[in-house]
Amino acid sequence: QVQLVESGGGLVQAGGSLRLSCAASGLTFSRFNMGWFRQAPGKEREFVAAKSWDTGNTRYADSVKGRFTISRDNAKNTVYLQMNSLKPEDTAVYYCAAARFPGSWVYWGQGTQVTVSS
């Protein structure tokens, strides 16, 4: 049974930082692309960042480029999202996801709330 468990969310002031973690189990983590998505109240879920399992390439949404960094530790089966210079518009529930093939996000975590106050 695949499980993705996010942690690290919370309340932070604008300009602050948070690091989200997502611990994976039940899958061959090193062979999965890992990504982060977010969903703000009243909005659709949107892509934030992803890191491929083979090339190590990273992709970011334009809205977070230069502020967020995705990384992974295959030894710990964990993917991270370092979020700096946070803005109120970053407030959302953040989800991690796993994809065996590019764009095919098949496994999802339960989400962690990030709230950025102005």
Image (cartoon, rainbow, N blue to C red):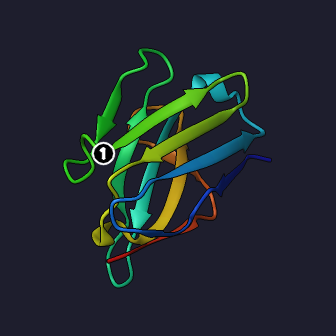
Residue appearing at x 31%, y 35% in the figure: 59
Residue appearing at x 31%, y 72% in the figure: 88
Single out the residue that lies furthest toward the top.
55
Residue appearing at x 65%, y 36% in the figure: 78
Secondary structure at numbered mark 1:
loop
Number of numbered discs: 1
Question: Residue 26, how many percent across, how many down?
Answer: 78, 39
Residue 32 can be seen, yes or no: no
Q: Amino acid at mark 1?
A: Arg
Q: Is residue 73 left or right of residue 26?
A: left
Q: Is residue 58 left or right of residue 20?
A: left
Q: Is residue 110 left or right of residue 101?
A: right
Vertical relation: 91 (above or below) 63: below
Q: What residue sits right under mark 1 in the picture?
A: 67
Return the residue nearer the eye: 104 or 48.
Answer: 48
Vertical relation: 85 (above or below) 43: above
Question: Residue 116, how many percent across, how many down?
Answer: 40, 71
Q: Is residue 71 left or right of residue 60?
A: right
Single out the residue that lies furthest toward the left.
62
Quadrant housing the C terminus: bottom left
